[in-house]
Amino acid sequence: MDVQGAFDAVLRRRLLQRMAQQGWPRELLQLIDSFLTERRAQVRLEGTTTAAHQMQCGTPQGSPLSPILFLLYLAELLWQNSELRFGYADDLNIWRATHSLDNNATLLRQDIQSILRWGEINKVAFAPEKLEMILHEESDTMRHQQ
């Protein structure tokens, strides 16, 4: 499931609090705090550049640290069901495997509702309209070999 404006959604103080709860060293927290503090941005379009504005939240676009920091920000959500949820960059993935398509659909629906609730509480907007599902079924050959 895609996150809308993923890297912009990271709140610095909340990220640092979560990383402290996860047990990251104080020195690393200080480095991340410095990395995310007093950042400024400008927009350039067709030869015109805006004045610099201080960024209040988010992680730098294009920085290799941004996807990592974002996943640390989401870690609480991923750990709620760590064998079934995992993330990469700004995408969240859910894995379900049962012997019933209906059961899978029910479980996935519950997972999605849980994720959307978490997002509302934590000010992270997911884009359910970008949701993609892949269904894998055992082949008859696989069933007969077991």
Image (spheres, helix red, strand yellow):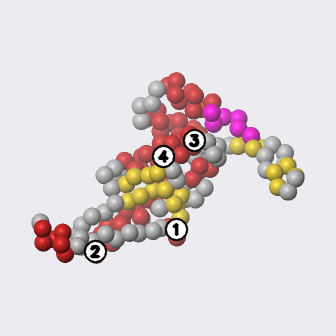
Residue at point 45% right, 56% down?
A: 92
Decide if residue 88 is on the left or right side of residue 7: left
Mark 4 and mark 3: span between their CA atoms? 12 Å
Q: Amino acid at mark 1?
A: Lys
User: Which callout, 4 or 2, points at the residue further toward the start of the chain?
Assistant: 4
Q: In the image as oriented, which residue stretches furthest toward the right?
A: 48
Q: Are marks 1 and 2 in contact (CB under 8 Å)?
A: no
* SS category of the residue bearing label 2: helix
Q: Secondary structure at mark 3?
A: loop
- Disc 2 or 3, which lies upstream in sequence? 3
**Picture layout, residue 74 above or below residue 16:** below
Label 1, secondary structure: give it. Answer: helix
Kindly identify which numbered label has been placed on residue 64. 3
Identify the residue under disc 1. Answer: 130
| Magenta segment | 35-40
* Mark 2 Cα-neighbour bin, 10 Å: few <14, some 14–19, many ≥20: few
To which residue does mark 2 refer?
101
What amino acid type is highlighted by mark number 3? Answer: Pro
Q: Name the residue rendered at 51%, 60% in the picture.
A: 2
Image quadrant occupied by the C terminus: bottom left
Which numbered disc, 4 or 3, marks the residue that appears first in the sequence? Answer: 3
Give the image location of residue 107, x and y in percent: 32, 66
Q: Which mark is residue 71?
A: 4
Where, by quadrant of the figure, is residue 36 drawn?
A: top right
> Can residue 73 be seen in the rendering of this structure?
no
